[in-house]
Amino acid sequence: MKKSIIPAALLAALTINSCKMENPLLSESPLEYGAPQFDKIKKEHYLPAFEQGIREAKAEIDAICSNPEEPSFENTIEAMEFSGRTLDRVSNIFFNLLEADTDDALQEIAEKVSPMLTEYSMYVSLNERLFDRVQNLYDRREGLGLEKDQLKLLENTYKDFERGGARLSPADKETFSKLSEELSLLSLSFSKNVLSATNAFVMVLDSEDQLKGLPDYVVEQAAQNASERGEEGWAFDLSYPSYGPFMKFSEMRELRRRLYTAYNSRAFGGEFDNSGIIKDIVSHRIRIANILGYDNYAEYAVEDRMVKNPARVEAFLQELLGPSLPAARAELAAVQEFANRSGFEGQLMPWDFSYWSEKYKEAEYALSDSELKPYFKLENCIDAVFGLATRLYGLQFIPRQDIPVYNKDVKVFDVLDEDGTHLALFYADFFPRASKRNGAWMTEFRGQSIRNGVEERPLISIVTNFSKPTGSAPSLLTHDELTTFLHEFGHSLHGIMAEGRYPSLTGTNVARDFVELPSQIMENWAFEPEYLETFARHYKTDETIPAGLIDRIVATRNFLAAYSQVRQLDFGILDMSWHDIREVPSEDVAAYEKAVLAPSGLLPRVPETCISTSFSHIFSGGYSAGYYSYKWAEVLEADAFSLFQEKGIFNRDVARSFRKELLSKGGSEDAAVLYRNFRGHDPKPEALLLKLGITASGN
């Protein structure tokens, strides 16, 4: 048979079309609201989808560059904003699953695509023809007649090019590209090591004597954990629902020491050591900052945030640390004294603190996690958190069993506005598993935008590690877990209620030190009696939580508040110490960390532990030179929530204003302006100190 000859261009087109038909990542999802086709996406789809997405995105950039027409906002800035649609879709799905449901195959794909994505990023940010068009528009911006959000997008785009190396020499551009590619791989390796080190440890107990002090629910969870691992007895691992309760309740001090040391030495030495990777990451960040004209990475990182410069960050952290440190030492002394009165001998070590502070809280306030958990059944908490959004904003959450999910534990809800308009799909992934990293976070599979008059509503997700149901009990949350739920849900509302045209300006696409405001303000309701009494019911008796128990929750709100604040400030100080420097420290990572944290140390330091090697927020997350933002946002929310307290915690007018001025605006205006539009003034650190009961004298 004679072989047919097909023109190369036609063959390429046929190949691409065939891929799109077979690969669910390469075309718009036919599902309602464009929900991802998790039931059809396979691991082998990702790499070709990334390759095709990058080809399409580059072609769109080339088309902008070669456009013979004079640069305009529409044919340049707007065209760039909406380019790379396929690549965005693939990336959003892949990298979310890399964190929430990963395995070796996904990790390998990530290592392959990371340099590809960095190369594409450089293809855009170092593109001289593209930057010339952006520069042309930026220079003429005042005369273009742009609307407020359009001007913000133009200014952001220009700054991104400047900060992305557009003005560098050819040689520096080449170095910048190489460093950026290597840095992305280093961050991936860091994250992979933390997850591997976390999963590598398990403490299996084989005697009931080793379970002394543990509540029944902890014992049952440990037995289930062991069974799932094919072990006899009781298994404790480094996921927080396993680790946290053991440290709080176990009477076995030596076992607490063992578990504490394992948790706090993750990726510190051994097979998954991150020590060298940290120094490489810091070195690369310093070199990138230097090439771009900054003295250090912190200068580069905070330039476009509310604080604007590292000196202001340092001053802010010290302004809070000054009164907090003596108050924290007084709290620690009180726990030490209580422990000694209770028969403990010697100085409290880090593995003792959770245990004795829990005992102290029980003695002082007659309150413990084991007493509270029965009132916080997960299903009731879900209804209550959704119900709060209903009372404040009129939102409705409708379960959708027909939407595919990436794991059987994931739940999906259709979010409707007060008038019944669809706002978002909301995915909730609550329980820990080996394929999920520790912690809790909010993310999105797609943000909100409007293109050619057609609006796409967002696909929002929260991921947590709450206690799983057992054979005899449903999932029961601690009060801390309820607070975490509200926190991540606040981020979700920021995405759900987004309004705007341009995806890079909507939802949570705001300054890093502003993004935590919508989440942290939601935590306040976890301590409001008027809210708690609406849903906290005993899972066995259906009895409403007693008023006295709520009073004790409120009374303990500031229990060890100064100690907790210093701990968070330490994280911020450590973060800045790694980024507000001009050269990599000569000493080893642990020694450097010890010196940095020594002035604010509370408990004795354990030599075989290290925070930095598993500090994912700053070495593989998005918080490098930005961990301070949690406290910065706490100042904002303390001031903002005082308006709800003044007008009523369910006041619809205040909620409507918060939605209109903050939640819906995204990054369309400067964050400080948005805050003043809502509150009428700038916040002060004193608002947070007052909320926490910490005075200037530290009492």
Image (cartoon, grey):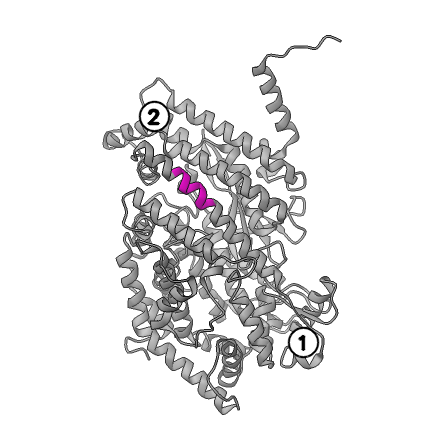
Instruction: Specify whether 514 is left or right of 413.
Output: left
Which residue reaches farthest front?
A: 586
Give the residue displayed 45% in from the left and 50% down from the top: 494
Q: Quadrant of residue 382?
A: bottom right
Label 2 and label 1: CA atoms lie apart by: 66 Å
Q: Residue 250 location, x and y as percent?
A: 60, 78
Callout 2 amino acid? Arg
Residue at label 1?
A: 216
Circle 1: is it few (<14), some (14-19), or many (20+) Cα within 10 Å? Answer: few
Give the residue displayed 68% in from the left and 10% down from the top: 4
What residue span does the magenta drawing correspond to? 177-184
Residue at label 2?
A: 129
Give the residue displayed 72% in from the left and 69% down from the top: 472
Nearest the viewer among 395 and 95 is 95
Callout 1 amino acid? Asp
For the N terminus, give its image quadrant. top right
289 versus 634 height, above or below: above
Give residue 429's mark.
none
- Sequence order check: which comes first, mark 2 or mark 1? 2
Instruction: Specify whether 116 is left or right of 239.
Output: left
